[in-house]
Image: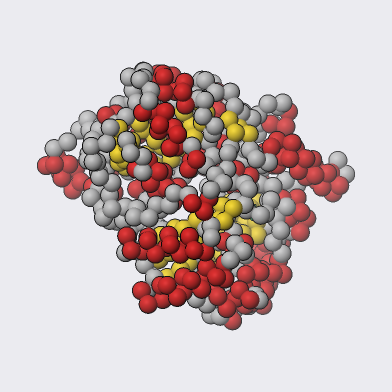
Amino acid sequence: MKKEKLGKIFAAVQTPGRYTGSEYNAYKYKNERFRFLLCYPDDYKIGMSSLGYHTVGKIVSSHIDFAVERCFAPAPDMEKIMREEKISLFSLESKTPADKFDLLGFSVHHELSFTNMLNMLDLAGLHPMRAQRSHKDPPVIAGGPATVNPALLGEFADLMVVGEGEGIIPGLLDRFTSSGSKEEFLASAAELEGVFVSGKSSSVRITPYLKFDDSYVPCGQPVPCVSIPHDRINIEISRGCRGSCRFCQASVIYAPYRQKTPERILDIASASVASTGCDEIALTSLSATDHENIIEIMDDMHYAFRDLGVSVVMPSLRPEDFSGKFASGLSRIRRGGLTFAPETPSQRLKKIINKNIDNEKILEAARQASLRGWRKMKLYFMIGLPSETMEDIEEIGRFISRIKSETEMKNITVSLSAFNPQPHTPLQWVIPGDPEVLAEKERRIKKIVRGTVKGIDIQSHIISSILCRGDSGLGNVVYEAFREGARFDQWGEHFDYSAWERAFNKDGKDIMEYYFRDFSRLKELPWDSVETVAGKDYLEKSYRIVLKLIGERTGV
Ligand code: SF4
């Protein structure tokens, strides 16, 4: 594409740095045989904050035959110009049109980014629906957490890497290099463990990558040239979680729990700081302080980086981390807000969802943290949990009042989410909460909580809940929603419920009927084609415990 033309376009859109490329460490083409376009169906700022996205970039660029380039969802102002000027979706690095790449890979982290994926395919001149694309079009691969239900996503992607990509992607790329056609590649890919080929595969098993300590890490990743939410080095120190909260999909799909050694973590940190100049390191994991060597890791970080002005953050802490031996280490971590996710203060509901986080421990953590000067606290609560009553909701107000009166935490934010029965969790058979009741509960919380309350976009929750449990019959609805203008559905300012209503209507389907679908009546669930380490028997057993707990209380 001509430089002058692009220059004019970049001058006319907001934050043009999202499209220019040329960042430090941007990928370079070195005459490799094949070109892979790594697509993120959301804004540059979100994609560039994603460790998973950078990790896939590292894996593909490590393959001798593949060059990688990046591409993100264009914001509405950019899309408008691209459509008016008939500019095809292009890569950041060389500005090559997307359909000229040999493979397109989408990192799909959330079902609310499906419409962005469809929009990107459309802008690339490719039909968003898989069945409408030809054998000459490049294969479209999807990876990321949304692949754990391949039924709906398979209407758009040709194949999905289900689960952890490290052990699967290199072999998948090998199959591509030795295939003579798209058809041959898809047939060959269907033989691989962890790969689900739409229209060909009937099942797939999530295979954990057991060489986790040696796994690919994106040291030397591209350094963003515009401000992004998490402009830092993310190091995944462990994978999986020792907890087993019944609503939590991550703990099931990333099982079993694995961790990196302190030596490896320090090596990654040192190499990443040296190759990016980044001044913040986040030790990420579902539960960082579960790492058995966490004290040693924090000491290593402290001594290695204290003179370089590099700060270390730990986004996931547990209340008990603020007392005992570990507490002194916390003062070395940059002091942000204290964040916990009790989900509910009700002991009865905690038992139902199996959330093992004690209210008294949260209070003690708040006390200990306030003694060390922390003043900000954020608490995540989930509403619409099975058998929840208004009395449970009232408990949230009482709990926040206790924290305020018994500690120095003066700045408390309550962040609400609505319970979403996610595939592969013991609560997958539960019908989600009535949106009107959810709205009433949210209003009540806003009235009784003394502090800031971040509410829920209930309409967005409805669509998310439908799509995450969606089957192939919804493919056309998502396509129609895209045609009706749905984009960036995860963003409150862009989410347009009316586009979804029109899409459902056009397809002769009722939104609320889908939302209230009773999956407990189905023998086969749309995502049963995916086998997890835990297995469906475990989920059923755990669900029966829930029914018993609810039954005991209600006498059902
Ligand atoms: S919600 Fe958190 S603590 Fe519970 S299982 Fe999931 S990751 Fe672990």
Could you say which is closer to the camera, residue 359 or residue 94? 94
Q: Along the horizontal axis of the image, is 252 left or right of 69? A: right
State which quadrant residue 184 falls in.
top left
Could you say which is closer to the camera, residue 411 or residue 293? 293
When the figure is inspected, residue 126 is found, relative to residue 347, above or below; the finding is above
The reply to whether residue 255 is in sight is: yes
- Which residue is located at x 70 percent, y 27 percent? 522
**Residue 274 point in image, percent of width and height:** 33, 63
Q: Along the horizontal axis of the image, is 304 left or right of 443? A: left
Could you say which is closer to the camera, residue 167 or residue 502? 167
Numbered circles on residues, count: 0
- Which residue is located at x 86 percent, y 47 percent? 552
Task: Quarter of the image for the N terminus: give it.
Answer: top left
**Residue 8 point in image, percent of width and height:** 15, 44
- Which residue is located at x 65 percent, y 40 percent? 533
Task: Quarter of the image for the C terminus: give it.
Answer: top right
- Judging from the image, the colouring scheme is secondary structure
**Residue 138 point in image, percent of width and height:** 34, 26
Q: Along the horizontal axis of the image, is 65 left or right of 358? A: left
Q: For the view shown, which residue lies furthest in the left direction?
A: 4
Could you say which is closer to the camera, residue 465 or residue 534? 534
**Residue 227 point in image, percent of width and height:** 33, 58
